[in-house]
Image (cartoon, helix red, strand yellow):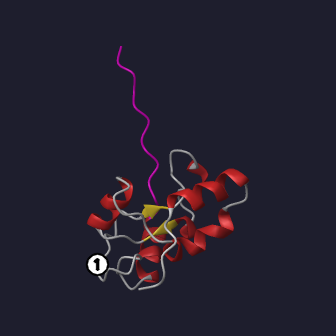
Amino acid sequence: MKKSRRAKPRVEQEVLLMVYLRTGGYCACGCGKRAALEAPHHVFAKQRWPELINEPDNLIAAAPDCHARHETAHRRFPQYAVRRARRLATTDAMRAYLARTYEDRALP
């Protein structure tokens, strides 16, 4: 008998739109590229913090190539791009995750 796979939790459509419009549809890193509506970046990883999957302050609009570079650690998103998520960091582990995952760069 086959095991059934659980459906992955998805970001709600109205949350996606809110995150996209917050930056005018552009990537939050400041590169000037258009963001992908359907694929926002989760500041706090959805695998580790699934309760934050639909929290707008945990999401940032990202261009597909910028998102891919961040995920491969080639070029991390800057601290200013994730400033809304700082209020969600309620534990030392979450604050440490922000500090080691996001670059300390000036605004473009």
Compared with 94, 47 (above or below) is above
Image-quadrant location for residue 108: bottom left
Q: 106 or 56: nearer the eye?
A: 106
Compared with 46, 6 (above or below) is above
Image-quadrant location for residue 62: bottom left
Q: 46 or 29: nearer the eye?
A: 29
Q: Residues within 10 Å of mark 1 (few under 14, many from 20)?
A: some
Tag count: 1
Q: 83 or 25: nearer the eye?
A: 83
Q: Main secondary structure of the magenta part?
A: loop
Query: In the displayed structure, does residue 61 sit left or right of residue 50?
Result: left
- Residue 79 position, x and y percent, is 53, 72
Residue drawn at the location 31% of the way across and 58% of the way down: 68
Residue drawn at the location 34% of the way across and 52% of the way down: 72
SS type, badge 1: loop
Residue drawn at the location 59% of the way across and 54% of the way down: 97
Compared with 98, 80 (above or below) is below
Identify residue for label 1: 34
Residue range (magenta): 1-12
The quarter of the rendered structure image containing the N terminus is top left
Residue drawn at the location 68% of the way across and 69% of the way down: 87
Residue closest to the far right: 91
Q: Tell me if residue 9 is in the magenta stretch.
A: yes
Q: What residue type is labelled 1?
A: Arg
- Residue 101 position, x and y percent, is 51, 58
Query: In the displayed structure, does residue 104 sit left or right of residue 39?
Result: right
- Residue 63 position, x and y percent, is 31, 70
- Residue 36 position, x and y percent, is 31, 69
